[in-house]
């Protein structure tokens, strides 16, 4: 099977890296396409894959095309290759906000379609990916998508109606979590911790908390209660959070990101 990356930025690289590390594909089964000579040189040297700046050269030779360009240029990119797609091909789009209906209009009637929302944690094989497919998708397509993105994290199939929320929560979420982590680091530095120590302590605390919640399946409130001792340090800190507008601010943050996702569609 031949895989083509139409766009070779950081997200495309993260997907490719996971595929190669899991041996889902070998370098000679991949073609990376991009308008940036610098990105193509990087993909060649880092992963030993074939590269091209010509989308019309790449598309006809691939079974699966992973569309990894910015939403703002997707019409231009697909317009150049629309007539080259065949019914044997699967087009996988990671463009935020672009619905299956839009992709069908741009790709024509031939290829099968899948819409995917991954996040940048794929770069360290701890990504979160949601996907949806058209009704006529093959079971083999679903299995392949689960393999491609499962090679770099967790995968979840959802109805497309949920994708604006998915984009806000897991697509944009790494930036929001990093912002909160930065605030914890800054607070710890003000308490006298060296920067590197504060960062390591904050990072590992975030990682460990996520894993603990995921593996235990505990309710978030119950988890917080288990960490809090009566009149202890955690409870003292939580009282500040409970009396603040942090919860509301995070809800507004997700709502703003979801609203932008709808605008992009």
Image (tube, rainbow, N blue to C red):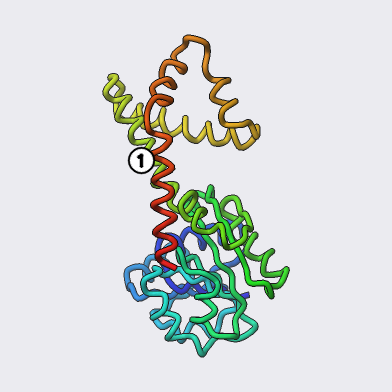
Give the image location of residue 132, x and y in percent: 61, 64
Give the image location of residue 223, x and y in percent: 58, 26
- Quadrant assignment, res 23: bottom right
Mark 1 falls on what kind of element?
helix
Along the line of sight, which residue is nearer the eye, 223 or 52? 223
Question: How many labels were placed on the picture?
Answer: 1
Residue at image position (46%, 16%) is 235
The answer to whether residue 245 of the structure is visible from this angle is yes
Viewport quadrant of the N terminus: bottom right
- Crowd class of label 1 (few under 14; some 14 to 19; many from 20; radius 10 Å): few
Residue at image position (51%, 63%) is 16
Is 188 positioned to the left or the right of 62 in the image? left
Viewport quadrant of the C terminus: bottom left
Image height of 213 relative to 12, above or below: above
Q: Residue furthest right?
A: 139
Is 260 positioned to the left or the right of 191 in the image? right
- Quadrant assignment, res 220: top right
Residue at image position (53%, 59%) is 163
Residue position for label 1: 179
Give the image location of residue 41, x and y in percent: 37, 69
Residue at image position (67%, 72%) is 135
The answer to whether residue 28 of the structure is visible from this angle is no
Is 59 positioned to the left or the right of 236 in the image? right
Image height of 25 relative to 173, above or below: below
Q: Residue furthest bottom?
A: 83
Give the image location of residue 120, x and y in percent: 45, 53
Image height of 100 relative to 131, above or below: below
């Amino acid at each position: 099977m031949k895989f083509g990356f139409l766009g070779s930025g950081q997200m495309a690289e993260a997907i490719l890296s996971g595929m190669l590390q899991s041996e889902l594909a070998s370098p000679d089964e991949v073609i990376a396409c991009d308008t940036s000579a610098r990105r193509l040189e990087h993909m060649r040297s880092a992963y030993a894959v074939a590269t091209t700046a010509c989308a019309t050269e790449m598309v006809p030779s691939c079974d699966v095309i992973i569309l990894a360009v910015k939403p703002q240029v997707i019409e231009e990119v697909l317009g150049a290759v629309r007539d080259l797609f065949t019914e044997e091909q699967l087009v996988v789009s990671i463009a935020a906000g672009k619905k299956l209906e839009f992709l069908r209009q741009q790709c024509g009637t031939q290829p099968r379609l899948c819409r995917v929302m991954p996040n940048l944690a794929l770069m360290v094989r701890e990504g979160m990916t949601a996907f949806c497919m058209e009704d006529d998708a093959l079971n083999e397509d679903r299995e392949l998508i689960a393999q491609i993105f499962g090679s770099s994290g967790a995968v979840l199939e959802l109805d497309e109606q949920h994708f604006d929320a998915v984009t806000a929560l897991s697509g944009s979420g790494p930036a929001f979590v990093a912002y909160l982590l930065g605030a914890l680091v800054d607070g710890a530095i003000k308490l006298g911790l060296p920067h590197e120590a504060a960062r390591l302590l904050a990072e590992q605390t975030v990682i460990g908390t996520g894993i603990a919640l995921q593996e235990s399946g505990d309710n978030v409130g119950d988890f917080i209660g288990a960490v809090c001792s009566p009149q202890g340090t955690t409870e003292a800190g939580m009282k500040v959070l409970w009396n603040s507008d942090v919860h509301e601010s995070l809800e507004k943050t997700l709502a703003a990101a979801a609203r932008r996702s709808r605008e992009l569609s």
